[in-house]
Image (cartoon, coloured by chain):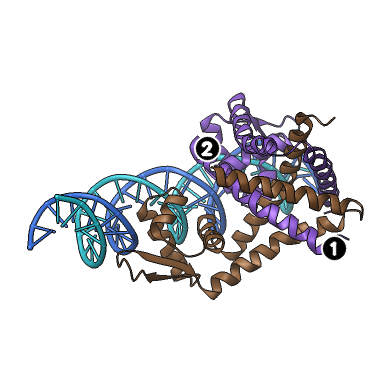
Chain colours: A purple, B brown, C blue, D cyan
Amino acid sequence: MTTPVQLKESLREWMDVFMHRSMRGWMTFAKSTGLSMPQFSVLMQLHHRGPCGMSEISEKFDITAAAASQLTEKLVQGGYIERTEDPNDRRAKSIQLTPKGKELVEVGMKERYRWMDELVSKLSAEDKPKVVEALQVLTEAARQLDKAT
Amino acid sequence: MTTPVQLKESLREWMDVFMHRSMRGWMTFAKSTGLSMPQFSVLMQLHHRGPCGMSEISEKFDITAAAASQLTEKLVQGGYIERTEDPNDRRAKSIQLTPKGKELVEVGMKERYRWMDELVSKLSAEDKPKVVEALQVLTEAARQLDKAT
DNA sequence: GCATAAAGTTAAGCCCGCTTAACTAAAAAG
DNA sequence: CTTTTTAGTTAAGCGGGCTTAACTTTATGC
């Protein structure tokens, strides 16, 4: 019998190892680009959720509208994002990644994925299918949880 | 047959979901404590690796000795860590968590674990043992990879 | 013993992110 | 058509993190 305790334990151990590695890589990369973490986070947000307005930025990152405006301004200066007027509501602005911004995100993702590929290479042939199945189960569960919240 | 491609895909999907959620929770908590992320990271470092000297801090976080000194100073002021002289080498200082610091880390961990416990509750009874096994395999592989590096 | 290296500290200065407050411009409400 | 609300910008000011440069103190090499 597998007790719930054992499962929680496994998840926590995995998370500790995983987070440690993943965070370090992520921060190192952000630093190497010369961007700050908030700046980088905005780029990631745009990559995942697509173009959005200032108000979404200030809401998602829990900062004032003023802070959001200044934050994006620097990314515009750097050529990573583009700010355009919403034709329907001329007060609103829409920000989106430029090719340069997309490129940067791509490189960052690859960096993050490299460790995982090494990890895959460490697994034995008979373990692989089991791991695939388990990860799919976990991902599905996580998505349901996100939808519920 | 399970192709390596499928495995990499599953890992990446899982990581995207996992990171998103995990990072957000972590940053939110750090913010709620009033500590900055570098400060919080130092506490986590001390929790995982135990007491260490200034030089380890500056090395691990890739900052100058001056920066490390100032960073830890604030944590000492806040009562989260304690700075003591190394009796063997009186130039060196050893920093470690105070009870208050340990308490904070504990609370932060619990916060981080809560989502995972919800996740566990979403899994079906027959999936659970599979997930346990897979996570253990992955954790072991990750540890080996860390040792090698 | 004396020069040199090593571990930390302190201070000045820079950039960053954030907040509040005062603003512009456009949309919605009445 | 005027008032109010909404979206965003700009500027001043604060604290944080980081660096360099100049230090103090302790250990090491010769």
- The residue type indicated by label 1 comes to Thr
- The residue type indicated by label 2 comes to Lys
Q: Quadrant of residue A117?
A: top right
Does residue B18 lie above or below B92 as drawn?
Answer: above
Q: Nearer the viewer, residue A12 or B98?
A: A12
Q: Report the label total.
A: 2
For numbered disc 1, what is the local secondary structure?
loop
Q: Which residue is mark 2?
A: A74
B129 relative position to B40: left or right: right
Which quarter of the image is occupied by the C terminus of chain A?
A: bottom right
Residue D19 locus on image (x, y percent): 35, 46
Is residue A3 at all visible to an observer of this figure?
A: yes
Q: Which mark is residue A3?
A: 1
Q: Nearer the viewer, residue D5 or B72?
A: B72
Q: Quadrant of residue C24?
A: top right
**Quick one: label 1, few (<14), some, or many (20+) residues within 10 Å?**
few
Residue B146 locus on image (x, y percent): 58, 46
Q: Nearer the viewer, residue A74 or D6?
A: A74
**Of the residues under marks 2 and 1, which one precedes in the sequence?**
1
A140 relative position to B87: left or right: right
Residue D3 locus on image (x, y percent): 72, 52
Is residue A22 at all visible to an observer of this figure?
A: no
Task: Calculate the distance from the C-alpha at mark 2 to the C-alpha at mark 1.
Answer: 51 Å
Which quarter of the image is occupied by the N terminus of chain A?
A: bottom right
Q: Chain of mark 1?
A: A
Residue lying farthest to the bottom in this orientation: B99
Residue B30 locus on image (x, y percent): 60, 60
Label 2 vs label 1, nearer the camera: 1
Q: Nearer the viewer, residue B130 or D16?
A: B130
